[in-house]
Structures are given as C-alpha cells and as structure tokens.
Amino acid sequence: MRVDTGGAPTVGAAAQPPLLAEHLALPGVAGASSVLELPGVMGEDPLTLLALDADAAADVLSVPPGTADVAVLAGGLRDEAGDPGTPLPDDATGIAVDLTAAVALAVDVTADTPWYWADAHESRSVRAAAWVADDAGALSQVLLGEVAVSYAPGGDPGAATGVGEQPTTHTLAGELPGPGRWRLVAVDLLVGTPSMPARATVTVDRASATTPAGDAPLALEGWAPVTSLVREELAAVRPAGAAGFAADLGGYGLPLAVRVLPGGDAGLPPLALTVPAPIAERYDLAPGDESVLTVSGTDLPVRVAAVADVIPGAVDRAAVLADEGALLQHLVRAGQSVPRPGEVWLGAEDDDARGALAEGALELARAQGATDVTVEVAGATRLRTSRHPCASRSGSPRWARSSWPWRESSRSRPRC
C-alpha cells in the first residue's frame, strides 16, 4: 500500500521526511520504504526517476505475474560505496559538534568610513545543521544552533559568547527527528559575511551522538567541504582542519553556505539504475554501460544495473528505478536543497492485515504532522483524512474505492 503524506518537496527543519522507524513498527507490516519520484531526462527522453530502499523492494513491490523478478529489478541498485557517512548508535537521540571558528576583515576599516564601520559591526552568526540518513537513505536535517559573529576590527566577542578575530571553540547540539537507525552524512555551515573582503575559517573538530549512556564520538576522517557548491565570486573556499574550511570572502555581504561531508569534492560511483527495455534499446544500453541522467538540472553519472520490461514507476511516462540512499548521496553533493520523499510504501504480512495496517498508517501519518494524507491499497481501496468527502461525519476515516489501480503495461504497485 502507498501512504502519500504530501508536504514540501524539499527537506527542511519543519519539513522532514516521514519517520520510517515508526512505519516499520506498525502491527502487520512486512516492510517499508520512503519513496522519491522525480522528473528526469535521459538523452532526449523525459522519464520518471523512482527511488526507494533497494533492500526493502521485495517487501513493498510486486509486478504482474510472469513479467519480472523484483530481485532482478532492485538487486543491483545498492552499492555500499554510495552510503558514506558515520553510523550513530541505535539508541542515539541527538548530535553535537564542536566548532572552532575565526573571522576577520581583509581591508582596513576605521570610524572615518562610517558605512563600512557600521557594516563591520553588524550582528551576524555562524549556524550549523547536520544531515542524517535513515534506513531507507532518506535525509533529514538537524538544526544544531548558532554562534554570534563580529567582524569589528580588533573586536572579539569572546570564547563564551561568539566568534571574532581569534579562534574560539563552541559546542552546538540538536535532537534527531525520532527513533530509528541514523547515519551522519553531512554538516552544513552557514556564515554571515560583510560587504567587504574578509576571511573566515570554520572547522568541525569533533562530532558525537547523544545517548542515554553519554556522548559517543563519531568519526570524521576524510570529511571535507564541497567547494563546487559555492559560487566562485562569493568566496574562494578550501579545506581546513580535520573537517572544515577556510574562505576568502568576496565582499558581497551574502551568507556563505558550505557543506562538509565524506570525500568533499571527490565523486561517487555512478548511480546504479534499472532501465526499461525501450530506453535501453533506443540508446543501445546494456547492464554495465554508463550514461547520464539529468535530474533537477543536474547531470548525474549513471550505470545500467539491469534492463527490465516492467519498471515500477509513473503511468504517463517511462521510469527508471534507483536506490533512494544512493540517489540522495549524489544530490546532496550537487545542490544545497535536498528532495523530500512524501510517500511511504508498505508491505503487509498477509492479506488479512491490510485493513488494520492501512488504518494504522493513516493515524501514524497524522501523528507525524501530515494534514492531507491518502492511504491507498493497490487495486482495492483508498483511505483519506477526515477533510476528504469519504470521511464520516464523526471525522473518522472511511473506505472508498481507489482510483489508483496500476497499469500492467507500465507500472507495478506497492505490495499489500
């Protein structure tokens, strides 16, 4: 069955993906995966990129009998090299980082130049946020807080209160979105900058997971900034420290956003895809061949893992299948915003469990903050929130006939 929670298309502190661990804990569930559906182009062909947890595909997908093997569809999509990051303890509830930072003007400014003097004394900050991946690879953002910054000549707000010309160290922390197994995959650092040339250095000296037993250190070896995400005219960014950056600021007065993650600018292996036979035939692609898939204006290197006649995807266009975690590791390196999966596909342990599982999934989506939820049991029924006409007068959900039967020619369906 498919749980459509709606919501924002990109991840933010107030727009997190559905909490997968709570879906996996629903009575009667056999498996679960969040699902991303993004428009893309391969060659001259528009298509849909469908991404889900490849390890859960056998539990949440089915295809028409005799047409394809789900193990073949998804078996070659998961690549451990595409899952960088540091696992958190299973009982972790939060993340903390120790930041060392310093900022300074690169030009002389005095009170005789009042506009520049006032700009140098303007209140600014260094902010930090962590990106964590769940079991399916979906990314959530954890806000870690901020520290005041002053570019005032000779002015140092002091180690206890903020950042100035002399390096100071500050501990910032935030809570994880909820229970589950998480992996720290990136840290975003946002530095306020003045409207004149300046320098800034920020390093993540230590990261730890908050657990009931105390803090557990998280390894950051090999972490570096993704300099390609920073416009050259805004700043010249280079690695600094164990996991941080130093920047020569161009004087535009715009916030400088730097993402630090494993490998920095080093590329990942091509994204593995299962490709529909018509696309493979048109571009003469076979398993092992490499190509390019354009998603949200970004050219992603891809590798054909399998070719299949039936691909889970959109009805109105061809679709390719990818592992959600591997895809998002490419996208988090390609742009500042990260797509948010708004759907969860569930597999039921048996047919008798479907009704109760659908009711439970609807209530869970509401509890997680979704306001316009649709739960669809493939080829059977649809369950919606009380704002839908199918709801009873009491506000409780009611069953209605689904308009989401899959088409055998182009679409498989979540299993339930």
Image (tube, rainbow, N blue to C red):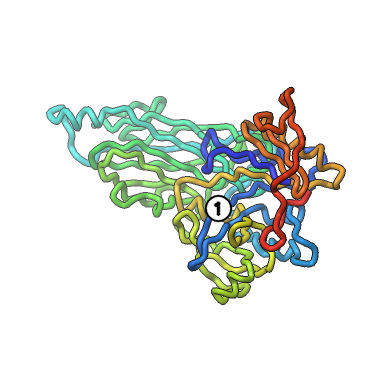
Could you tell whether 401 is left or right of 232 in the image?
right
Classed neighbour count for the residue bearing mark 1: other residues with Cα under 10 Å, few (<14), some (14–19), many (≥20):
some
Q: Residue at x 70, y 46 (%)?
A: 403
Numbered disc 1: secondary structure: strand
- Nearer-the-camera pick, 388 or 310: 388
Residue 257 place in picture, x, y as percent: 40, 43
Which residue type carries mark 1?
Answer: Leu
Q: Residue at x 73, y 55 (%)?
A: 61
Q: Is residue 56 visible to us here?
A: no
Return the residue found at the far right.
352
Could you tell whether 378 is left or right of 331 in the image?
right
- Nearer-the-camera pick, 106 or 7: 7
Q: Residue at x 66, y 61 (%)?
A: 410
Q: Quadrant of residue 354?
A: top right
Q: On the image, numbered disc 1 is attached to which residue?
A: 38
- Nearer-the-camera pick, 298 or 406: 406
